[in-house]
Image (cartoon, coloured by chain):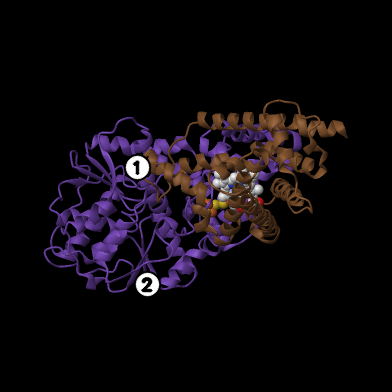
Chain colours: A brown, B purple
């Protein structure tokens, strides 16, 4: 058990980050090297680079094409991703002492705590709801079900499992002590040795970490690669 | 393009297919990325005319593209090699080829999916890849292969010779003289004329009104000597785009470019043909297939629309009193952005122009795109599946004349009206202009060509 704990808490984080970074860099570099003849699709932004970049940004931030193509899906997909992004930002509190920054901006400790449990708690519920809706939609709508394969279910389930373990910690009777995680991540980042970090004694935290790291490694090899690809494909197709 | 002389063994077939799919790894970038990042969200299915017509797995765009993606994964991704089906990888089975001949011709290449896919994935690119593989194996469907062969042999898809062309032009000149009581010229092979007009497939021989419309515009502007047609090149159609054979596409194209050079024109003025204009403008000219060109590529619709805007052309709209709508050919709308100009011409020449919704870049395909329109062996599919949405859309406008700027669309729409027993006429944009343009202050005493 201690070996597993050490592996997940002390080894896997480095492996996962390395795999993610190397694989993403390799992917993006291999895309860049390929010839990309113009494939205009109208209405297109004007050929200058700036208009094209703005167009791509709109696609990545607002899912504009999807909005035009399938509004119900847009509501859930966009909601899902926005909450995902917020949760990602929220984790800054878990890994670092960002509270200091908020306090210099004039927030009280109670205020931060309130924002965290209010917005954070809502986000934890929202992302679970949207992920479940996306999954149910996938299983119910024939046009989505007939193109669904193991990988699609896996991606959503993995995210679902991460969210559930995260919520278990947040909504547990006694809230997880963030001082422990901050200490743990600080040691990880400085290669300070984490074998006996107190945070790792918590089984739910360990599971949550493990799943998140698996997801991180899965991204470059799965359809979640769209998170890097979208910046390229829209350039390709709308480019004059 | 044509049947290969020697039968390929199963192994050879498999190798050809797998090799050309693995080649995607080396680009183009779009194709490679399409292999790697579909979210399987189903949006393309809800905007595809074929899937609208029949919502079956077979017609789901993401599933069709997955046929190639699975083979790609099998041979080119680590996860595919290790985990097979679990990682979306599957081997190619030569027995599937027979079905491939159908399935790669069940997408009209309209690019509507690309407009709405959150990642801009353009299934027409993969469809063309599938067709290219078939073509390499000599398995392009016969109806298609024949059109390409005739085109490469004679320079036009009807297989017509110079004498047939000249006879048709003589006929048009006579008709126009009868309509307007004054001679209106159609110059042929005139070296040094500023504009070289390249009509769409069949427009000289089958749907002559558009050519008359263009001739009348030049006449009214006093530019009757500034343009010409060619007795060799009178059909812009290029089916190499549709069979996925780049070599055929370029061979067909070169004849036209060479002729334009011989004629020493300043402008190659393309007619009402979506894919012909797209190949010339967006592919040949933009990618510089033949180096620097001594001429520019333009289209006749913006050209005429600009002259109308300048107030140089006048109309008697009462000649076209019926409700008229416009169908945006996918190649003009989504692929070339010629959308306002045909409307400007129709609004100037018709009393009751009405929009069809959605339109322009979001328009639904007629159901005959990607060359399907020429395939009468799949007419049931075109009428009942791929063309279903278009039929609904046209009915909703209440129009009795559908104008469109593409010979493939025209053929498909005409057949749709017959099949669904609708009394709706189908024709071109310059056709309506020809019927109402004023020459010496008077519009044509119209002869009914449809009778
Ligand atoms: C710039 C960043 C991103 C953009 C623009 C983006 C965009 C999209 C879009 C447009 C879809 C299709 C709609 C849908 O099926 O819900 C999608 C699906 C999905 N995305 Fe993202 N995404 C991004 C980042 C991420 C990240 C970082 C993750 C996960 C860690 C992720 C996970 C997913 C999943 C699991 C689906 C599939 C949902 C389903 O199966 O219905 N995305 N994304
Ligand atoms: S719309 Fe795009 S991402 Fe969604 S299933 Fe179709 S191709 Fe895939
Ligand atoms: S190109 Fe047109 S017909 Fe083909 S999959 Fe896309 S929307 Fe459907």
Comparing B213 with B47, the one in front is: B47
Badge 2 marks a residue whose secondary structure is loop
Q: Is residue B83 left or right of residue A26?
A: right
Q: Position of residue A233 (x, y in %)?
A: 51, 41
The disc placed on residue B281 is 1
Q: Position of residue B34 (x, y in %)?
A: 57, 41
Instruction: Confirm if mark 1 falls within 8 A of ligand 3.
Output: no
Badge 1 marks a residue whose secondary structure is helix
> Are tags 1 and 2 found on a single chain?
yes
Q: Position of residue A193 (x, y in %)?
A: 75, 26
Above/below status of A120 relative to A236 = below
Comparing A114 with B198, the one in front is: A114
Comparing B382 with B26, the one in front is: B26
Q: Quadrant of residue B342?
A: bottom left
Which subunit holds the residue at mark 2?
Answer: B
Q: Mark 1–mark 2 contact, CB under 8 Å?
A: no
For label 2, the crowd category at 10 Å Cα-Cα, with few meaning under 14, some 14 to 19 and many 20 or more, is some
* Residue identifier under label 2: B400
> What residue sits 73% from the left and 48% below the top?
A166
């Amino acid at each position: 058990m201690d070996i597993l704990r050490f592996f997940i808490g002390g080894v896997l984080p480095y492996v996962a980050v390395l795999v993610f970074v190397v694989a993403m860099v390799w992917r993006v570099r291999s895309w860049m090297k390929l010839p990309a003849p113009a494939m205009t699709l109208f209405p297109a932004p004007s050929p200058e680079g700036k208009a094209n970049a703005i167009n791509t940004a709109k696609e990545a931030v607002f899912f504009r094409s999807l909005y035009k193509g399938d509004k119900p899906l847009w509501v859930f997909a966009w909601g899902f991703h926005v909450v995902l992004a917020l949760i990602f930002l929220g984790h800054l509190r878990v890994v670092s002492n960002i509270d200091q920054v908020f306090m210099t901006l004039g927030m009280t400790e109670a205020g931060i705590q309130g924002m965290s449990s209010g917005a954070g708690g809502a986000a934890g519920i929202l992302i679970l709801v949207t992920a479940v809706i996306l999954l149910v939609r996938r299983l119910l709508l024939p046009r989505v079900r007939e193109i669904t394969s193991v990988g699609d279910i896996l991606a959503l389930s993995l995210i679902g499992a991460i969210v559930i373990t995260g919520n278990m910690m947040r909504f547990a009777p006694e809230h997880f002590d963030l001082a422990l995680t901050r200490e743990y991540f600080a040691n990880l980042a400085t290669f300070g040795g984490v074998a006996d970090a107190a945070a790792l004694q918590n089984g739910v935290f360990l599971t949550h970490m493990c799943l998140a790291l698996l997801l991180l490694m899965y991204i470059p090899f799965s359809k979640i690669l769209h998170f890097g690809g979208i910046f390229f494909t829209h350039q390709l197709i709308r480019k004059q | 393009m044509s049947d290969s002389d020697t039968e390929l063994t199963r192994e050879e077939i498999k190798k050809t297919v797998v090799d050309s799919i693995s080649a995607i790894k080396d680009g183009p970038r779009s194709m490679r990325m399409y292999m790697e990042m579909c979210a399987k969200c189903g949006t393309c299915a809800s905007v595809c005319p074929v899937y609208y017509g029949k919502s079956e797995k077979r017609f789901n765009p993401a599933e069709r593209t997955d046929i190639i993606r699975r083979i790609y994964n099998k041979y080119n991704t680590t996860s595919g090699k290790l985990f097979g089906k679990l990682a979306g990888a599957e081997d190619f089975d030569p027995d599937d080829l027979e079905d491939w001949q159908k399935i790669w011709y069940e997408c009209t290449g309209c690019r509507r999916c690309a407009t709405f896919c959150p990642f801009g994935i353009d299934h027409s690119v993969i469809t063309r890849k599938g067709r290219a593989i078939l073509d390499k194996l000599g398995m392009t469907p016969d109806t298609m292969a024949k059109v390409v062969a005739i085109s490469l042999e004679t320079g036009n898809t009807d297989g017509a010779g110079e004498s047939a062309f000249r006879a048709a032009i003589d006929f048009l000149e006579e008709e126009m003289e009868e309509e307007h009581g004054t001679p209106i010229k159609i110059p042929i092979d005139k070296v040094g004329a500023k504009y070289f007009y390249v009509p769409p497939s069949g427009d000289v021989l089958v749907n002559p009104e558009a050519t008359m419309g263009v001739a009348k515009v030049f006449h009214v502007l006093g530019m009757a000597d500034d343009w010409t047609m060619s007795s060799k090149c009178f059909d812009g159609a290029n089916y190499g785009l549709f069979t996925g054979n780049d070599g055929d596409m370029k061979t067909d194209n070169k004849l036209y470019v060479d002729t334009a050079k011989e004629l020493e024109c300043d402008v190659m003025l393309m007619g009402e043909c979506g894919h012909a204009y797209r190949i010339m403008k967006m592919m040949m000219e933009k990618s510089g297939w033949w180096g620097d060109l001594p001429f520019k590529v333009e289209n006749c619709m913006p050209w005429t629309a600009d002259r109308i805007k300048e107030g140089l052309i006048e109309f008697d709209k009462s000649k076209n009193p019926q409700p008229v709508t416009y169908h945006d050919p996918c190649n003009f709308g989504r692929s070339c952005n010629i959308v306002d100009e045909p409307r400007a011409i129709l609004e100037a020449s018709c009393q009751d122009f009405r929009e069809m919704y959605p339109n322009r870049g979001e328009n639904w395909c007629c159901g005959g795109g990607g060359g399907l329109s020429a395939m009468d062996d799949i007419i049931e599919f075109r009428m009942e599946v791929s063309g279903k949405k278009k039929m609904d859309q046209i009915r909703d406008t209440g129009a009795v004349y559908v104008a469109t700027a593409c010979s493939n669309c025209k053929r498909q729409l005409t057949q749709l009206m017959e099949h669904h027993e609708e009394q709706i006429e189908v024709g071109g944009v310059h056709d309506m202009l020809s019927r109402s343009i004023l020459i010496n202050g008077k519009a044509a005493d119209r002869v009914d060509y449809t009778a």
